[in-house]
Image (spheres, rainbow, N blue to C red):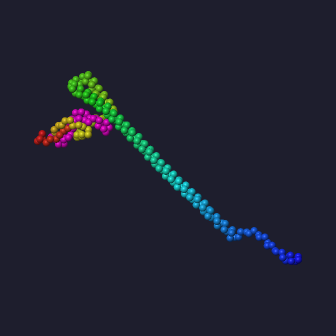
C-alpha cells in the first residue's frame, strides 16, 4: 500500500523561476526613447523659431519708431524755421509800414526845402534839413535802402513812370532820366517804388 501511495503520488512541477528580459526585450526599450527625444527637440525648435520671429518683429517695430521719431524731429525743426521766417517777415512788414510813414514825412520836408528857395539856407531851413536828415538816418538804420534808378533802364518792378521825355537817341529809349520821388526797398521787398521820368525814343523826322 505504501508502495502504491508512492507510485500514485503525483509529482509537483518545480516552481517557475522569474524570467529575465531577453536580449530582444532589452533592445526594445532603447528603440522607444528616440521618439520622445525627437518630440522634445521639435518643441524646442518651434519655441526658438517663435522667439526669433517675435524678436525680428520687435526690431522692425523699433526701426519704424526710430524713423518716425526722426521724421517728427525733422518736421519740428522745419516748423520752427518756418515760424521764425514768418515772424521775421511780419517784423519786416511792420518795419516797412513804419518806414513808409517816415518817408512820407521826409518827402514833405524835402518839398518845404525846395519851395523855400533861398530861405533853405536860413536858420529855419537848416533846422528843417537837420530834422529831415535825422529821419532819413533812422530809416536807413532800420535796413531801408534807397533805390538807384536815374540812368538805369526803366523797371516797372521798382519804379512808376509818372512823366515822359522825348529823346532822338534810340539807345536812350526807356531810360530813367529823372527821379520825381525816391523809391526804397527793405531787403528784397520794394516798400515804395520810385516815381520817375522816362525817356521815349522818337525818330528825329517825327520829333
Query: What residue appears at the point 39 percent right and 39 percent down from the top-left corner?
Result: 83
Relative to 48, residue 154 above or below: above
Q: Which residue lies furthest to the right in this view?
A: 1
Relative to 64, residue 80 above or below: above
- Percent of width and height locating residue 141: 33, 32
Query: What residue appears at the point 23 percent right and 35 percent down from the top-left corner?
Result: 195
Q: Is residue 195 magenta?
A: yes
Q: Is residue 183 magenta?
A: yes
Q: Identify the image quadrant of residue 191.
A: top left
Q: Main secondary structure of the magenta part?
A: strand
Relative to 122, residue 90 above or below: below
- Percent of width and height locating residue 92: 34, 35
Residue 143, visible in the rendered structure:
no
- From the viewer's perspective, is 99 left or right of 36? left
Q: Which residue lies furthest to the front in this view?
A: 1
Residue 176, visible in the rendered structure:
yes
Quadrant, the N terminus: bottom right
- Percent of width and height locating residue 100: 29, 32
How many numbered marks, from 0 up? Answer: 0
Return the residue nearer the eye: 105 or 97: 97
Q: Residue furthest top?
A: 123
Query: What residue appears at the point 51 percent right and 54 percent down from the top-left corner?
Result: 56
Quadrant, the C terminus: top left
Range covered by the magenta-colored residues:
168-197
Q: Identify the image quadrant of residue 145.
A: top left
- Percent of width and height locating residue 86: 37, 38
Amino acid at each position: 500500500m505504501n508502495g502504491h501511495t508512492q507510485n500514485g503520488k503525483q509529482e509537483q512541477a518545480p516552481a517557475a523561476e522569474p524570467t529575465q528580459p531577453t536580449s530582444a526585450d532589452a533592445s526594445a526599450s532603447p528603440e522607444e526613447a528616440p521618439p520622445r527625444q525627437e518630440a522634445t527637440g521639435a518643441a524646442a525648435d518651434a519655441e526658438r523659431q517663435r522667439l526669433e520671429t517675435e524678436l525680428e518683429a520687435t526690431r522692425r517695430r523699433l526701426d519704424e519708431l526710430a524713423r518716425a521719431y526722426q521724421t517728427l524731429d525733422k518736421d519740428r525743426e522745419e516748423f520752427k524755421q518756418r515760424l521764425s521766417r514768418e515772424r521775421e517777415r511780419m517784423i519786416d512788414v511792420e518795419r516797412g509800414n513804419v518806414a513808409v510813414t517816415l518817408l512820407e514825412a521826409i518827402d514833405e520836408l524835402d518839398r518845404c526845402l525846395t519851395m523855400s528857395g533861398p530861405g533853405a539856407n536860413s536858420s529855419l531851413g537848416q533846422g528843417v534839413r537837420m530834422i529831415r536828415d535825422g529821419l532819413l538816418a533812422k530809416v536807413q538804420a532800420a535796413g531801408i535802402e534807397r533805390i538807384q534808378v536815374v540812368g538805369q533802364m526803366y523797371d516797372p518792378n521798382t519804379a512808376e513812370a509818372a512823366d515822359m521825355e522825348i529823346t532822338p537817341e534810340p539807345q536812350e529809349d526807356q531810360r530813367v532820366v529823372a527821379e520825381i520821388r525816391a523809391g526804397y526797398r527793405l531787403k528784397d521787398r520794394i516798400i515804395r517804388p520810385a516815381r520817375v521820368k522816362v525817356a521815349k525814343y522818337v525818330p528825329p523826322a517825327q520829333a
